[in-house]
Amino acid sequence: MAKLTRVALAGEGGQGVQVVAEIIAEAAYDEGKQAIYIPNFGLEQRGGVSVAFIQVSDTRIGAPKFHTGDVVVALSSRAVRRTHQYSGPQTLYVYDSSFELSPQDYPPQAKQVLGIPALERSKAIHPRVFNIIVMGLVVGLTGIVSYDALKQALDKKLGYKFEKNPALRDMNYQALDAGIEMAREALKGGEFAHAE
Amino acid sequence: MVEKPITGSRKAFMTGNEIVTWAALASGADIMFGYPITPQNEVMHYWTRLAPRFGREFLQTEDEISAGFTVCGAVQAGRKAFTATAGPGNVLMQEPFGMAEAMRLPVVAVIQQRGGPSSGTVVYSQQEVTLTAYGGNGEGHRIVYSVATHQEIFDYVIKAFNTAWTYRFPTFVLGDGYQAKMREPLELYDPAERGIQLVPPTPLVGLPGAIGEDREPQHLCNIYSLEEELYDAVLRLEKDYQAMAPLVVEWQEKNCDHAELIVVSHGVVSRAADDAVQALRQEGVRAGFFRPVTLRPFPQQQLREALRRSGAGRLLVAESSQGQLLRLLRQELYGERVPIDALLMPGVGIVDEDIIAKVKSIL
């Protein structure tokens, strides 16, 4: 893992982007790493584009914001347009290929662009765990936190829901694993790698 | 006996707003008055959840003007009271803050700066420097701590209550939307365990004894019939403020020895400036770092001394506003001949690469 990893995660309000960022940052903190997470959204209570900025490092983190991420993930077509600015020449840019994206929508700068059908994949488990698939994806692509720490942080955040409905725990773990698996495939240049 | 909010110390990973609440609890704050505005809402949110557990109180007023005045009232009754606000809320609170200056009320306010002018953004800026330091129809007789890290939010909220109750000038902790909303590790502690004595609040009105017999009248005045009376009152404020200034002024200075250029920044931007200066030094660029922690009173002498000692031929101001720190600096450095460059990015974050690039373009 690089010393400092920067991730921008963007989606529609309500897609659960901030929850994912919070769990990842919590997991990093629990592992004894330095972590900063800033949520960013507009004035809308619902329906705006929501962006989360996550930084994880072994050493003290300076500025809480960054201009370009190591990994940028956009989960809707509006989120893609909103996140162009965070994609630089060294950025791994990931979008959810479940929605149509025309070539002019691609970020002007990126090291690599990956389309990953996370939304499509969530339908096979449960649409509600879409964001947990995305969480697995982010961690699978970056390795910023360990699998165990992530699972513990997930339990800490959603444990009270799991208590009421144990089936939810399995569903969330399954989603997490699905996300990590998709990341693994994508990094291999496998079936999800971007090819137009 | 109500339990202590924090015993010993413990590590935490939380938002800046949540820390404000814990720090106010640890400071012995009795009551918060507030009105919702992003990005400080969660201060109220957490306070309303936690305060009842520790026997503390909360009142949501009808607007920020009332929130400020109710704090003014509560401190006169001898209660440690505080408020938190941002942006247009900070504008509205200037009237009560002015009253606090006039009547020497130990008001504590946390300001989480958002973008302006007007409603601007709910996100972030450093555009409330002038307002917080010099707002109101007075002379800026206030103390403003500009914090940079989550640990400092905790430390300086505790300090702000002590400063306010020691010197009786309104005291501000100036944060911003990033610091309000972001999560970062810090250590929460019981101030007593760190040897920090909490200054106890005392009532300013309703004092015991007969006026004229046992004691002088307590004269908390914010209006005068004669202009000469006001003149004398303002001079007294100024005299007390100047006497206090050296006791509360705070600053940070790093790498200024033999610096060719000193980067001046405050608050969250100083984190990027610190990293930028360290990176530049590693490349052999002789950059230095100076950060006013108190924007009021400003560490004027300390910056002048840093300039002289280092022999730096240039200053660079970096801030997320169109020159509010720069104006302060020009006023405080009047007479110095050092040229001042500026990296001004109103309402957006500044990262170390921005400062490094700017320094390289100058030197």
Image (cartoon, rainbow, N blue to C red):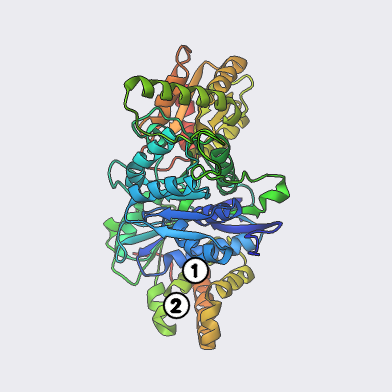
Tell me the number on the disc at residue A129: 2
Residue B360's place in the image compared with A165, above or below, is above
Where residue B233 sits in the image (x, y, percent)?
42, 25
Looking at the image, which is closer to me, A13 or B11? Answer: B11
Looking at the image, which is closer to me, B256 or A67? Answer: B256
Residue drawn where x is 27% and y is 56% of the image: A104
Label 1: few (<14), some (14–19) or many (≥20) C-alpha neighbours in 10 Å: many
Secondary element at image label 1: helix
Task: State whether residue A189 appears in this view.
Answer: no
Residue B14's place in the image compared with B198, above or below, is below
Residue drawn where x is 60% and y is 61% of the image: A28
Mark 1 — residue?
Answer: A135
Relative to A110, is B160 on the left or the right?
Answer: right
Residue A120's place in the image compared with A194, above or below, is below
Label 2: few (<14), some (14–19) or many (≥20) C-alpha neighbours in 10 Å: many
Q: Amino acid at mark 1?
A: Met
Where residue B215 sits in the image (x, y, percent)?
55, 35
Do discs 1 and 2 share a chain? yes
Chain letter, disc 1 residue: A
The C terminus of chain A: image quadrant: bottom left
Where residue A119 sits in the image (x, y, percent)?
38, 74
Looking at the image, which is closer to me, A93 or B357? Answer: B357
Q: Amino acid at mark 2?
A: Val
**Label whose residue precedes the other's in the sequence (1 or 2):** 2
Task: State whether residue B328 appears in this view.
Answer: yes
Secondary element at image label 2: helix
Count the labels in the image.
2
Looking at the image, which is closer to me, B191 or A127? Answer: B191
Chain letter, disc 2 residue: A
The N terminus of chain A: image quadrant: bottom right
